[in-house]
Every structure is written in C-alpha cells, then in structure tokens.
Image (spheres, rainbow, N blue to C red):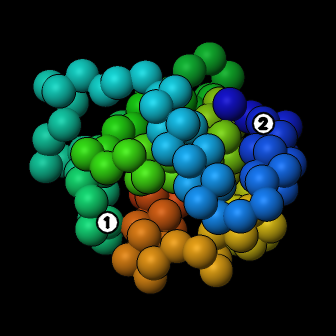
C-alpha cells in the first residue's frame, strides 16, 4: 500500500454513517492482510505496547524501500495494521519520517472511536516502524 491508498482508506471510512459499519470495514481490512508465517512470530518481532499480540518485521527492498510484514491475533488490530501499512509500506526511511499519521488517524475518526488501549497499540506499531526504519 502507499500514501494514495491511505487517502483512499480515509475516503472509504467517510462513506460509512456509523461506527458499527466502520468497525466492520476495519475488520474486513484486516482480513485482506496476508498471513504471517508462524515462524516469524517470535519475542523479537513482538510489538511492545500492544494489548493484543502484534508481530512485525521489516525487509529492505531495492532503493532502500522498506516493506513490512505484520500480523495480530485480533481482527480489529489486523485492520489497524492494514491502515499502518497503507501509510508506510514501500517507503524509504526519510519518507516514513515525513508521514503525518496522527492527522490520518484523526481524519478516519479513530481518535474518538478506539479504546485507549487500541489507540496506544496503534501508535506502538507506528513507533516500531519508525524504529525499524532508522536501523
């Protein structure tokens, strides 16, 4: 996914009238994620700060572009992963630093409709991506 996909996600969320429909869409986004190989789900790949289990790895592609593989044991969190990947997948470290994920988070309405634990987990994933990008 790329930044235009993040904008597309924002527009898609705006199409729904209530948050029950938006949660359904979020779960559908999570179902669209490819499954992560269980062998990659280790303590080293576990994202700290998430209530649900979230695993994430980073691979460097041609041109210094970073590709992330992530998974969770919770359906809604998998949807949140899809949003995070829409913002950061395939970017360079400098492009990752330039992403204004907080604004996208608010525009989608997640700031008002996620529990504090899920909100913290979302930003823990963002921080993990930023950390992996610096390494």
Q: Quadrant of residue 63?
A: top right
What label does residue 50 carry, if any?
1
Seen at 50% across and 44% down, the residue is 27
The answer to whether 94 is drawn above or below residue 5 in the figure is below
The answer to whether 108 is drawn above or below residue 59 in the figure is below
Seen at 71% across and 70% down, the residue is 109
Residue 85 image position (x, y, % from top left): 58, 41
What label does residue 90 carry, if any?
none
Q: Quadrant of residue 51?
A: bottom left
Q: Secondary structure at mark 1?
A: loop
Taking the image as shown, residue 43 lies to the left or right of residue 70, namely left
What label does residue 5 carry, if any?
2
Residue 84 image position (x, y, % from top left): 58, 49
| Number of numbered discs | 2
Q: Secondary structure at mark 2?
A: helix
Mark 1, Cα crowd under 10 Å, few <14 / some 14-19 / many 20+, is many
- Does residue 91 appear in the picture of this structure? yes
Q: Nearer the viewer, residue 37 or 73?
A: 73
Seen at 17% across and 27% down, the residue is 38
Q: Quadrant of residue 57?
A: top left
Q: Nearer the viewer, residue 9 or 69?
A: 9
- Does residue 81 appear in the picture of this structure? no
Q: Quadrant of the N terminus?
A: top right
Mark 2, Cα crowd under 10 Å, few <14 / some 14-19 / many 20+, is some
Which one is earlier in the sequence, the residue at label 1 or at label 2? 2
Task: Say if mark 1 contacts mark 2, CB within 8 Å.
Answer: no
Seen at 71% across and 64% down, the residue is 18
The answer to whether 19 is drawn above or below residue 54 in the figure is below
Residue 88 image position (x, y, % from top left): 64, 44
């Amino acid at each position: 996914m790329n930044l235009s996909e993040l904008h597309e996600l924002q527009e898609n969320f705006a199409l729904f009238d209530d948050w029950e429909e938006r949660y359904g869409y979020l779960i559908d986004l999570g179902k669209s994620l490819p499954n992560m190989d269980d062998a990659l789900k280790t303590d080293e790949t576990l994202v700290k700060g998430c209530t649900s289990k979230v695993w994430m790895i980073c691979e460097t592609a041609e041109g210094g572009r970073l590709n992330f593989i992530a998974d969770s044991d919770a359906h809604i969190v998998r949807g949140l992963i899809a949003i995070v990947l829409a913002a950061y997948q395939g970017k360079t470290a400098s492009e990752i630093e330039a992403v204004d994920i907080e604004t996208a988070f608010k525009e989608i309405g997640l700031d008002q409709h996620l529990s504090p634990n899920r909100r913290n987990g979302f930003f823990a994933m963002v921080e993990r991506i930023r950390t992996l990008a610096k390494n």
